[in-house]
Structures are given as C-alpha cells and as structure tokens.
Amino acid sequence: MHIIIIILIIFIITLFPIPIPFKLHYYNNNLHIYIYEKEISFKKRVTKNIKHDIRSKDYFQILKDFYPLIKNVAIKLKNNPLKPRLIFNLYLNFGFEDAAKTAICFGFLNSLSPILYFSIGKFFHIKKYTFSIIPNFKSSKIDLCLKSILRISIVNTIYIVILILLVFLNNKKLKNTKILHPKEEL
C-alpha cells in the first residue's frame, strides 16, 4: 500500500507542472528580482586590475558558431506540445523631460508588443499576455515591472534538455570547433 502511494506521488510530481512566479522591477535606477516573493540580491564583485587580451573577432566567431544551435532549438520547440506554460505581464510607466520624445518612444514601444509576443511564443505556451505602457509627459522617470508565472514540469525539463543535446550532437560544425579562451589559443 505504501509503495503505491509513493509511486503515485512520484507520478504526480513528474507530470504536473510546478508554478514558478517571478518578478523583475526596475525603478530609481535599481533592479529588484523576486522569485516566490523573495528578493534575490546581487553582490558586487571586487576585481583586481588585470590586463585582458580581448579579441572581439574570437567572441563573434563563437556567437556565429552557436547561432545555428539556438535557431535549431527554437525551430524544434516552436510546435512542440511539451513547451513550458507562461503567464506574462509587462507594465512600463516612463517619461522624459520633452513631451515630443516621450510620444515618439511611446509609439515605438507599443510597436514592440507583437514582436515580443512572437519571440516568447517560440519557447513557451503563452497562457496570458499583458503589455501595458503608460507615458508620463510631465516628469522624467522609468518604472518597469515584469510579473510572470512559469509553469514547468520535470518531464518538460528533461525533454528540453534532451532536445538541446540532440541538436548539439547533430551539429557537425560545432563538433569540430574547439572553443577556448582567447589566451589559451596562443
């Protein structure tokens, strides 16, 4: 009897999605990130002055090599029934000192709504989508609040990881490339 209950609990945990609410709030030049209503704080790292040998062409080459991988994963996830579910709410209250600049930015930002919906829709099933922009013509401020609930199950996670691994293993160009730090290539 106990074994049946344990198997039933494992089955429920595996198949039913777990909601993960998160919130990103940017105001007064401060970024606050909350997961399950608990704020995540980032500590600033203190680094020593180290001379870096930066070769931007090497980093661009790495991005060029990984672009087909990301594109293939997006194509495979596009019509997949096992995508995670997402509730997406974005609220933006902004203003500049000049009302004309605020009006131009308001029009531009409103035109980004379908592009954002399409981009998010490639990786998630969107259950609810809210995109609200409020211009403030009298004061200069930016107040951005992103509230979302991601519903993901263990089956979704395993499937997506396997999908990424299969795309990575099937990519012949990435198999032969050796990705090293620029200093290691010398």
Image: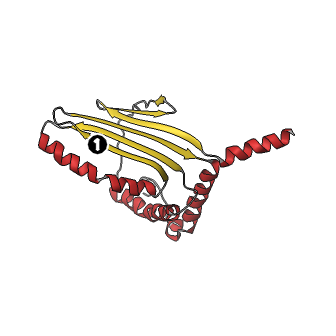
| Residue 3, image x, y percentages | 84, 42
Can residue 33 be seen here? yes
Foreground: 33 or 144? 144
Q: Based on the displayed image, in which of its 4 quarters is residue 161 positioned?
A: bottom right
Q: Is residue 128 above or below residue 177?
A: above
Given the image, on which type of amino acid does mark 1 rest?
A: Ile
Which residue extends farthest bottom? 172
Q: Is residue 54 left or right of residue 14?
A: left
Quarter of the image for the N terminus: give it: top right
Where residue 22 appears, as percent x and y from the top left, is 47, 37
Q: Position of residue 83 (x, y in %)?
A: 54, 55
Q: Place residue 130 in its image quadrant.
A: top left
Residue at mark 1: 133
**Applied colour scheme:** secondary structure
Secondary structure at badge 1 equals strand
Q: How many marks?
A: 1
